[in-house]
């Protein structure tokens, strides 16, 4: 009965765009106890939009945006694209940056108009020796609303904050509820800051958040969860997620994700719908039952 059950399971999945790459993937999906989900692009749409721009007194908003956008134009990060689009929508003049440097998991720095400009999270400010000063409280308040907050520092001084929102996918909350109904724990894994991640997790019914994880550390976090013999699935979309997908007992890639994630995964969700995660686990369980 084994090969037949596997064919049936694989076929059932394929009809919903749930593509198991092999029989091992199908069998692994039956035993999953914890599902780790990347936040940006997996639980959220991955289409960040600037919602807030806050500057310290005496700073011209467009002036600051001009410097920040010059740095972000050199970056390939989705947040950077959102900032550039926002600057364009405000018709801010484009200038060029020199000595651009990407700081993975933190942000970027460059020299614009003779000023050293740093754009990124609190970790970047820390590395740059920048004190948030009067912006610290505003940063916290903005993060508590679920916004990703980008700090802009000019010549070592925190000058502004940019609030960026990324809307959860329509079915993310339902997917979490269905996983819970299957007795599966759900964990959010993200490079974004703790307060932002917790707010979004709250909204989606996720109880465990692992935030502020550097791109290179995602796989180690999955391995930690596996320590006691727990069977862990990882769902992700980005290049950053590939090592974690490989580490997991079941790597699940969002179909709209990067080629690297799709190649690394054991299972691909063609419709990019989080609800297909519980569907895949159910197909796995059904298949294993028929094999006994
Ligand atoms: P994620 O897991 O959310 O994709 P990353 O590891 O890529 O996160 O980045 C973590 C954090 O670093 C982001 O949430 C953001 O605060 C900051 N960051 C990274 N790159 C940039 C950038 N180009 N501009 C502004 N902030 C950035
Ligand atoms: Mg992502």
Image (tube, rainbow, N blue to C red):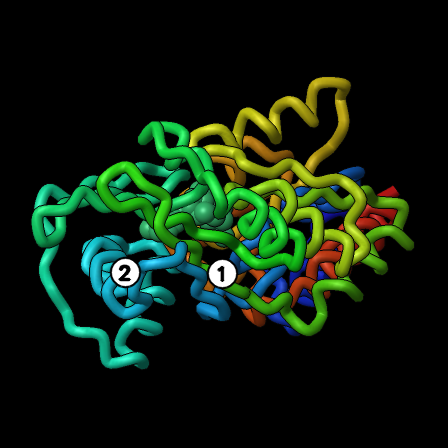
- Residue 161 in percent (x, y) is at 43, 55
Q: Which residue is mark 2?
A: 64
- Is residue 263 visible to the viewer in this orientation of the structure? no
Whether residue 26 is visible here, answered yes or no, is: yes
Image spot of residue 55 (x, y percent): 40, 59
Tell me the SS state at disc 2: helix
Rendering coords of residue 126 (x, y %): 41, 30
Q: Measured from the top left, where is residue 265 in percent x and y?
A: 51, 47
Residue 160 in which image quadrant: bottom left
Task: Say above or below: 280 vs 136.
Answer: below
Question: Outermost residue, front direction?
Answer: 58
Q: Is residue 177 above or below residue 36?
A: below
Residue drawn where x is 68% and y is 73% of the image: 170
**For the residue carrying disc 2, how many other residues have a C-alpha within 10 Å: few (<14), some (14-19), or many (20+)?**
many
Residue drawn at x 36%, y 34% is: 130
Question: Dot 1: few (<14), some (14–19), or many (≥20) neighbours within 10 Å?
Answer: many
Most distant residue in the top direction:
228
SS at mark 1 in the image: strand
Q: Are marks 2 and 1 in contact (CB under 8 Å)?
A: no
Disc on the earlier residue, 2 or 1 = 2
In the drawing, what numbered circle is on residue 163? 1
Q: Nearer the viewer, residue 274 or 135?
A: 135
Residue 240 found in image quarter: top left
The tag on residue 260 is none
Looking at the rendering, in which quadrant would you find the C terminus? top right
Q: Name the mark nearer the viewer: 2 or 1.
A: 2
Against 254, is 183 above or below? above
């Amino acid at each position: 009965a084994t090969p037949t059950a596997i064919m049936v399971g694989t076929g059932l999945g394929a009809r919903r765009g749930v593509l198991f790459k092999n029989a091992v993937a199908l069998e692994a999906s039956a035993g999953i106890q914890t599902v780790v989900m990347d936040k940006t692009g997996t639980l959220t749409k991955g289409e960040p939009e600037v919602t807030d721009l806050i500057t310290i007194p005496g700073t011209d908003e467009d002036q600051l945006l001009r410097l920040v956008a010059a740095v972000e134009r050199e970056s390939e990060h989705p947040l950077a694209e959102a900032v550039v689009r926002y600057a364009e929508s405000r018709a801010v003049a484009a200038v060029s940056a020199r000595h651009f440097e990407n700081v993975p998991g933190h942000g970027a720095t460059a020299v614009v108009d003779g000023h050293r400009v740093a754009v990124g999270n609190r970790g970047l400010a820390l590395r740059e020796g920048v004190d948030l000063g009067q912006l610290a409280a505003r940063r916290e308040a903005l993060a508590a609303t679920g916004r990703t907050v980008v700090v802009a520092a000019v010549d070592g001084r925190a000058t502004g904050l940019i609030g960026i929102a990324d809307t959860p996918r329509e079915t993310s909350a339902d997917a979490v509820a269905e996983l819970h109904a299957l007795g599966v724990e759900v964990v959010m894994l993200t490079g974004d800051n703790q307060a932002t991640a917790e707010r979004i997790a709250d909204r989606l019914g996720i109880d465990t958040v692992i935030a502020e994880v550097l791109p290179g550390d995602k796989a180690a976090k999955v391995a930690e969860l596996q320590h006691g013999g727990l069977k862990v699935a990882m769902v992700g979309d980005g290049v950053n997620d590939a090592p974690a997908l490989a580490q997991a007992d079941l790597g699940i890639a969002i179909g709209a994700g990067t080629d690297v994630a799709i190649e690394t995964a054991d299972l691909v969700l063609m419709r990019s719908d989080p609800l297909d995660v519980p569907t895949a686990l159910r197909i796995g369980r059904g298949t294993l039952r028929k094999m006994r």
